[in-house]
Image (cartoon, grey):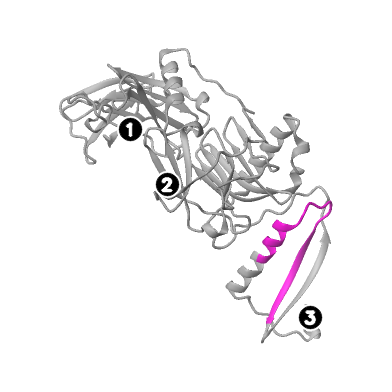
């Protein structure tokens, strides 16, 4: 731009003006319908005393190019990982094509990601497809896509409703603008519950919740957190596709394999994505108590089964996942519950607490020294070790256990102290 044009000196835009312009641009993108050719605008903006001058240069883009990926809108507190969004949406589109349902969704180039939510191996993309809300969930082995042609399952008298509720407990919906600050509560059969703040997109009102509970045993409500006047959400419409596009099946015939499969299937408070792909690890059994470990890549899970003392004759299972991904630590203690805890209604003196740890995958055996003259020699399976903690040890946050792990040649691959619980 030349001084010959007589324009005022160049100045930076104030942050609030820049944010407002970006927000208006994204609202326009969200509202526009599908088009065969779209144009990108390169704008040079100059702020003069009391005047705003803008010049635009338009250039055609290739017809096959996908829509631009927008940044998260300021104030949404949502994030967008472009790599996750592209990979997940491509897998969802491939699943749609494999199912022969491309006539029920806009073309892939009209899918615009808004934000992503990732927890362990579970990724969710909130997007629009031809201007309609869309949710795509992918795990290492499965794909689930909401139906963009479906009407949200609205709470009566509101514009808050669900579009997706997956087998892993992922919730996708739209929030009524009047319900700003609402919470999503999941009430699980047996009395457990969880509350999470709904963070909707300011562009479409879409939100995602990770309940990690079985939809068949979960009631969802919206409103103020844990408020008895919360409104129950109707069941979401069926997904357009829900398939295992990369199926994997681990051992479920050995004693540990059967125990892991049964426990993960029965766990009511934690649904584990890709559960069928977890290979079994150590199995502990003591009377009516059972603890089994499993591994899938860098993810480790512990699953416990014990009598349901509130419902005689029945058992209850709980899974403890490690959703934080592969660790940099050479070894770590995993968190689990005490089985037969007095508060559960168990008879006095029956409580047992397991010690479970993730160790180097090269280890095949380990010595656990509990520091009271008592130690245990345990087998390490695929980097997983488990043993019952002696009953006369206080389970305090300061308590430690010394662990020495060795490989098949007897070489020490880990030697150090870890927290006991």
Whether residue 82 is visible: yes
Name the secondary structure under disc 3.
Answer: loop
Whether residue 406 is visible: no
Query: In this rendering, would 87 be left or right of 122?
Result: right
Q: Residues within 10 Å of mark 2 (few under 14, many from 20)?
A: some
- Please identify the quarter of the rendering in which residue 255 is found: top left
x, y (%) of residue 277?
Answer: 52, 25
Q: Residues within 10 Å of mark 3 (few under 14, many from 20)?
A: few
Counting residues from the start of the chain, the first of labels 3 and 2 encountered is: 3
Q: Identify the residue at image location x=33%, y=29%.
A: 356
Residue 336, labelled with which disc?
1
Image quarter hosting the N terminus: bottom right
x, y (%) of residue 287?
Answer: 27, 16
Residue 195, labelled with which disc?
2
Counting residues from the start of the chain, the first of labels 2 and 1 encountered is: 2
396 and 265: which is toward the camera:
265
Q: Nearer the viewer, mark 3 or mark 2?
A: 2
75 and 323: which is toward the camera:
75
Asked if the stretch drawn in magenta spans residue 184, the answer is: no
Look at mark 3 in the image and give the residue it sits on: 2
Q: Considering only vertical position in the picture, is 339 above or below 108? A: above
Q: Considering only vertical position in the picture, is 307 above or below 51? A: above
- Please identify the quarter of the rendering in which residue 399 is found: top left
Q: In 3D space, how far apart are the residues under numbered discs 1 and 3 (Cα atoms)?
A: 69 Å
Q: Residues within 10 Å of mark 1 (few under 14, many from 20)?
A: many
């Amino acid at each position: 731009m030349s001084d010959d044009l007589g324009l005022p000196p160049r100045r930076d835009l104030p942050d609030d003006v820049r944010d407002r312009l970006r927000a208006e641009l994204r609202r326009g993108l969200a509202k526009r319908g599908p088009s065969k050719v779209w144009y990108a605008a390169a704008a040079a903006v100059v702020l003069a005393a009391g005047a705003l001058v803008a010049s635009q240069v338009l250039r055609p883009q290739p017809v096959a190019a996908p829509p631009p990926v927008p940044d998260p809108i300021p104030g949404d507190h949502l994030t967008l990982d472009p790599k996750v969004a592209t990979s997940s949406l491509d897998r969802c589109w491939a699943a749609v094509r494999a199912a022969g349902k491309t006539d029920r969704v806009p073309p892939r180039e009209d899918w615009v990601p808004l934000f992503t939510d990732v927890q362990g191996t579970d990724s969710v993309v909130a997007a629009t497809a031809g201007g309609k809300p869309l949710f795509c969930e992918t795990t290492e082995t499965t794909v689930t896509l909401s139906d963009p042609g479906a009407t949200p399952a609205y709470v009566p008298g509101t514009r808050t409703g669900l579009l997706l509720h997956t087998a892993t407990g992922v919730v996708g919906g739209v929030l009524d603008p009047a319900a700003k600050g609402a919470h999503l509560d999941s009430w699980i059969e047996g009395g457990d519950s969880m509350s999470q703040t709904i963070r909707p997109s300011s562009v479409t009102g879409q939100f995602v919740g990770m309940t990690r509970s079985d939809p068949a045993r979960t009631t969802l409500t919206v409103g103020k957190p844990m408020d008895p006047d919360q409104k129950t959400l109707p069941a979401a419409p069926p997904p357009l596709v829900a398939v295992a596009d990369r199926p994997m099946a681990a051992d479920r015939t050995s004693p540990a394999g059967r125990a892991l499969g049964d426990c993960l299937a029965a766990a009511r408070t934690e649904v584990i994505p890709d559960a069928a792909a977890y290979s079994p690890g150590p199995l502990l059994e003591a009377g009516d108590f059972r603890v089994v470990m499993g591994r899938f890549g860098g993810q480790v899970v512990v699953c416990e089964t014990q009598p349901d003392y509130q419902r005689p004759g029945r058992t209850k299972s709980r899974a403890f996942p490690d959703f934080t991904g592969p660790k940099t630590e050479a070894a770590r203690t995993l968190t689990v519950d005490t089985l037969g805890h007095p508060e559960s209604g168990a008879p006095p003196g029956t409580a047992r607490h397991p010690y479970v740890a993730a160790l180097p995958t090269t280890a095949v055996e380990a010595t656990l020294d509990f520091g009271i003259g008592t130690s245990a020699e345990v087998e390490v399976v695929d980097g997983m070790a488990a043993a019952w903690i002696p009953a006369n040890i206080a389970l305090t946050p300061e308590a430690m256990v010394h662990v020495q792990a060795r490989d098949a040649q007897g070489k020490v691959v880990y030697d150090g102290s870890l927290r006991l619980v």
